[in-house]
Structure formats: C-alpha cells, structure tokens
Amino acid sequence: MTTMIKECLLRSQQPRCCASSLSFAAAKGSRKRASRNTNVFKGTIGIRRRMGTTRAKSAPTTDDDDDDDDDDDDSQKKRRGVVEPSSVTLVLLAGGVGKRMGANMPKQYLPLLDVPIAVYSLRKFATMEEVGEIVVVCNEDYDEVFTKEKIEKPISIARPGAERQDSVFNGISKARKEAKLLAIHDSARPLTDLDDARRCFEDGAKHGAAVLAVKCKATIKQANEDGSIDKTLDRNLLWEMQTPQVIEPNLLKEGFQFVKENGLEVTDDVSVVEHLGKRVQITEGSYYNIKVTTPEDMFIAERLLNEEPKLRCV
C-alpha cells in the first residue's frame, strides 16, 4: 500500500492542482480578487563563494571608502543569493479553522504520529541557521502548543486576522527590524524539505521574492460563470504554489500597502509582489510538501513520515 502511495505522488513528477491553488475566476464582493500572468523561472541556488575586491596597499582608506565597500559587499551577496545566519524571520501561519478536515479542532493541531501537525514546521525551521526567529500566528487558545516547545530560536506570537493577508500582515509586524528576509509558511505543511526551503531562501535573497512550487500535472479548464468550459489552459505554464514564500521585508510591506489601497484580496503572499509588477522567482520544490487539509492527506502524510525519516526532523 505504501509503495503505491509513493508511486502515485511521484508519477510524472508533477503535482496535484486544486481549485484553491489555481483559481481563475474573479471573486465578487467588496474586495476585488485580481490575477495576473507571470513569467515562470526555475529556482536556482546562489553561489556561496565569497567574492571580494582588492585594494592597493598604498591607497589610504577613509570612512566613505569603508561605507562603499559595505555597499559593494551587500550587492555581491544579493547577486549570489547569500543568506546570512539568523537573517530570516519565519512567519508560521497557524490560525486557520480547517473546516474540510471535519475535526473538532483546527487541522494544524491534529496529532500526526502523536505530534501536532503545526509543531513539525516549528521544530524543523528552528534547526536552520538562517532562521533567526519564529513568529507564530495563532489563536490564544493554542499559544502553549508552541511556547512549551524547547527550541533554540526566539518565538513571538501574533493574532490571526479576518483573511490570510491580514494574518500575514499581523505576523510580519512582529518581525525584527534586522530581518533581511521574511519567510511565510503554512503550518499545515509538515513535510517541507529543508533543503528546498534553503534554496528558496537563496532565491529570495537574490531576486527579492521567491516561492516553492511544483509543476502542474492535471488538465486545468477555465470556466464561465454558468459552469461551462471557456478554454483549456496550457499545463506547461502552470505551477502549484506551496510555502515557504520568501520576500524582502520592504518589498512585502510595499505590496501590502498597495493591495490595501486598491481593495484587493490575495490568497498567497507573493501575489502582493506580483501586483507591484516585480519579479517573483519560482524555486522548484517537492510533491511531498503537501498541505494537510483532508483525512486522505493525513493518511498520506503518516505513510510518508514513516518511510522518509528526512521529512520528520522531530
């Protein structure tokens, strides 16, 4: 049975696509839901080799020279996608209700092999040297789920808002001013591979915004309002978004300001950068990085954790 599950997940090396991830219709209401076509790029790994400049020994140095050197060094690090230790603030979203699971508590707190689903992400990302702090967005009833964990990274708590974008904004408002990158992650994704997350951090450092994603396998139809098919979309251009989604703080705040001023609703975080017309880099991820939203997903996640110890990290 477990072999069949893994084969299904890996077949064609393409992901499942769901209506929530690939919505093509504009939502009605006070907020306008906008979508745009974006260029697709495959994620790349930044070069870690330090590249410096040489200075003639006889040339005197000044404070201005030192400042210029610092600027050059920062620019080189950005071009190479260098992510320094403790420079990333992880915003862990754990305030959802999870109605599709049909449980008596939000899905992210259900036990997965005796560990709450959300705790997998907390423990995993706490082991990354790039992560300097973790901001958990959750309802106060579940604060202790996170604060009782003995991890070596500082934890702060933020409260969820009415919509996802409100929760994200509340979370990033708690981030340290020193953070160079903000990584937004769904706590219902317990199977994230940290190597994939690290590559996404590097792409975010290099390009300003990056997101883990996988190629779409299913045939996707765009529908008319009456339920009839309008057209078939080119599957080769479609990607299913995952998390983490990694964005420079100033860029994300600028994007939130834009969507607020224009009354836009977004369902993922890099969308606010898209609305600014800025580049978002795709970092190709793994099919294992599923979002646990249904009982079937729980079944698959349990089997994968039993067979892939690397995904557990707890």
Image (spheres, helix red, strand yellow):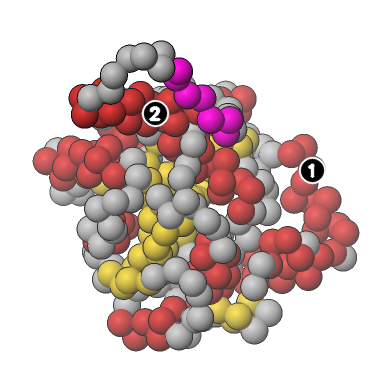
Locate the N terminus by quadrant: bottom right
Name which quarter of the figure residue 38 lies in.
Answer: top left
Q: Earlier in the sequence, mark 1 or mark 2?
A: 1
Dominant SS in magenta: loop
The residue at the far front in this view is 58
Q: CA distance from mark 1 to mark 2?
A: 44 Å
Q: For the residue marked with disc 2, what is the amino acid?
A: Asp
Query: Of the numbered discs in the image, which one, if any, rests on residue 288?
Result: none
Q: Is residue 202 above or below residue 113?
A: above
Residue 51 in magenta stretch: yes
Residue topped by disc 1: 11
Element assignment for label 2: helix
- Provide residue 194's location: percent of width, then percent of height: 61, 53
Q: For the residue marked with disc 1, what is the amino acid?
A: Arg
Read off the magenta span. Answer: 48-54
Residue 13 visible in rendering: yes
**In percent of the image, x 45 and y 18: which residue is there?**
54
- Provide residue 300's location: percent of width, then percent of height: 71, 65
Residue topped by disc 2: 73
